[in-house]
Amino acid sequence: APWAGRPAELALAPALLSMDSDFVFGAAAAPPPGGRRPRLSTLGASILINVLSYGQGACRDFTDSVAALRGDDAVAVGCDPSGSRVLEALLEGSAPPKVKARLAAGLAGSYARVSSTGAGSFLMERLYERSDIHTKEAVARELSGAAQALQV
């Protein structure tokens, strides 16, 4: 199961994002056969986006679950067309700044990888717009270091 080993409240996002998909959370680091990752669930992403639009009192477990994504899982979600919309919804929604900062921390060190995809570049714009000055500096530093690789 994509949520194996996670507390129940942190399994919400992985369960929804992989509900009708072959994507496996925790296995994103392994290169898939053929070099392409399976897409995340469009239906699951739509459900999460809608839930994240509610007030924080109604969706706290969902926001915490999305913000808890780390490492390759967070990058895979950020690079996926449906997954990136979920992360954008968290950034634009009613989640407190500390939850949004946890999402930014989950992507830290991978800002350039996420920005190198079409979906991820829009996500990184939202992340930058909604971040505090320290996160903005970290994003700018990492992206400036990868500027040559990011140029089209």
Image (cartoon, rainbow, N blue to C red):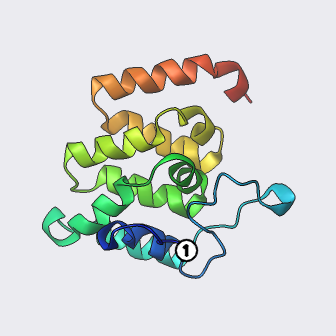
Q: Is residue 9 above or below residue 91?
A: below
Location of residue 130 (image quadrant): top left
Q: Is residue 117 left or right of residue 94?
A: right
Whole-percent x, y for residue 55 in the image? 17, 65
Whole-percent x, y for residue 9 in the image? 30, 70
Closer to the camera, 80 or 125?
Answer: 80
Residue at the image position 71 percent from the left and 19 percent from the top: 148
How many badges with numbers are in the image?
1
Category of crowding for the residue at label 1, using alpha-carbon neighbours closer than 10 angstroms: few (below 14), some (14–19), many (at least 20): many
Residue extending farthest to the bottom is: 20
Residue at the image position 26 percent from the left and 49 percent from the top: 99
Residue of label 1: 18
Residue at the image position 53 percent from the left and 51 percent from the top: 78
Q: Is residue 144 above or below residue 9?
A: above
Q: Is residue 108 above or below residue 62?
A: above
Location of residue 68 (image quadrant): bottom left
Q: Is residue 59 left or right of residue 30?
A: left
| Secondary element at image label 1 | loop
Whole-percent x, y for residue 134 in the image? 31, 23
Q: Is residue 72 above or below residue 32?
A: above
Location of residue 93 (image quadrant): bottom left
Q: Is residue 114 left or right of residue 90?
A: right
Residue at the image position 38 percent from the left and 72 percent from the top: 12
